[in-house]
């Protein structure tokens, strides 16, 4: 065997021509790319070794990303949430609470789900369940404020699922903002 010394990443949107997306380091296990919402994207990778052989390209699965705003009718909230205008929220609003036990649920069809939220020094933790089963907790805490951060990601079997977020009401920093 020989050692990989270089890689080339390409992407396609909606099945168009593959275009160069970057050259991750030979040992990289991830890459950062801008992903368009509402369009189908796919990436592939080629690797080159010390002898000059180029392998691949090997393509990953296609993905279609959707963004759901906190104001969407499909987002179901318990009582005790407040909606406010905010530059840190998607489309200029956030929905927040400082009370423990408040819930937000969303039913989706897909193979993965992520949660974007503002983070900061006054933010607490949120418990997550998928299809009624507790699957973890995420924290919105950060030493400095940040807008629209990915705070939770989970792959699921393809199909229809319900994610439910339950506020913890963290002592000293109870605010949760979704």
Image (cartoon, helix red, strand yellow):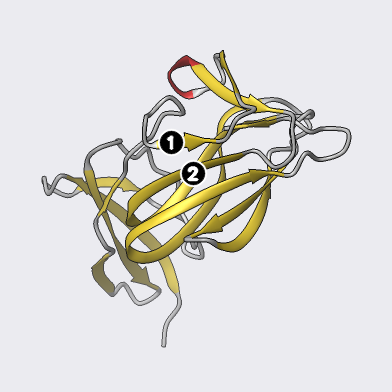
Horizontally, residue 61 falls left or right of residue 167, namely left
Residue 129: x %, y % from top left: 56, 57
Q: Nearer the viewer, residue 70 or 43?
A: 70
Q: Quadrant of the C terminus?
A: top right
User: On the image, which quarter does residue 151 sit in?
Assistant: top right
Which residue is at a point 57% across and 35% down the rendered structure image? 78
Q: Quadrant of the N terminus?
A: bottom left
Which residue is at a point 38% across and 29% down the rendered structure image? 72
Horizontally, residue 11 falls left or right of residue 128, namely left
Count neighbours of disc 2 (C-alpha within 10 A) and say few if under 14, some if 14 to 19, many if 20 or more. Answer: some
Judging by the rendered image, the residue that carries numbered circle 1 is 75
Instruction: Say whether disc 2 or disc 1 marks the residue closer to the N-terminus.
Output: 1
Confirm or deny contact between disc 2 and disc 1 (CB under 8 A): yes
Q: Is residue 154 above or below residue 73?
A: below
Judging by the rendered image, the residue that carries numbered circle 2 is 105
Q: Is residue 50 above or below residue 147?
A: below
Which residue is at a point 27% across and 71% down the rendered structure image? 54
Could you say whether the residue bearing mark 2 is in a helix, strand or loop? strand
């Amino acid at each position: 065997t020989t050692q990989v010394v270089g890689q080339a990443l390409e992407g396609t949107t909606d099945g168009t021509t593959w275009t160069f997306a970057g050259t991750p380091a030979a040992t990289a296990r991830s890459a950062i790319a801008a992903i368009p919402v509402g369009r189908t994207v796919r990436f592939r990778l080629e690797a080159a070794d010390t002898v000059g052989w180029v392998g691949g390209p090997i393509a990953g699965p296609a993905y279609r990303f959707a963004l759901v705003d906190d104001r969407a009718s499909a987002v179901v909230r318990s009582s005790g949430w407040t909606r406010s205008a905010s530059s840190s929220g998607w489309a200029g609003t956030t929905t927040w609470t400082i009370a423990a036990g408040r819930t937000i649920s969303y039913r989706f069809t897909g193979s993965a789900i992520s949660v974007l939220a503002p983070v900061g020094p006054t933010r607490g933790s949120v418990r997550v369940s998928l299809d009624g089963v507790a699957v973890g907790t995420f924290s919105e805490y950060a030493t400095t404020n940040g807008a629209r951060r990915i705070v939770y990601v989970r792959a699921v079997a393809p199909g229809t699922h319900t994610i439910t977020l339950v506020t913890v009401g963290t002592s000293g920093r109870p605010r949760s903002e979704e």
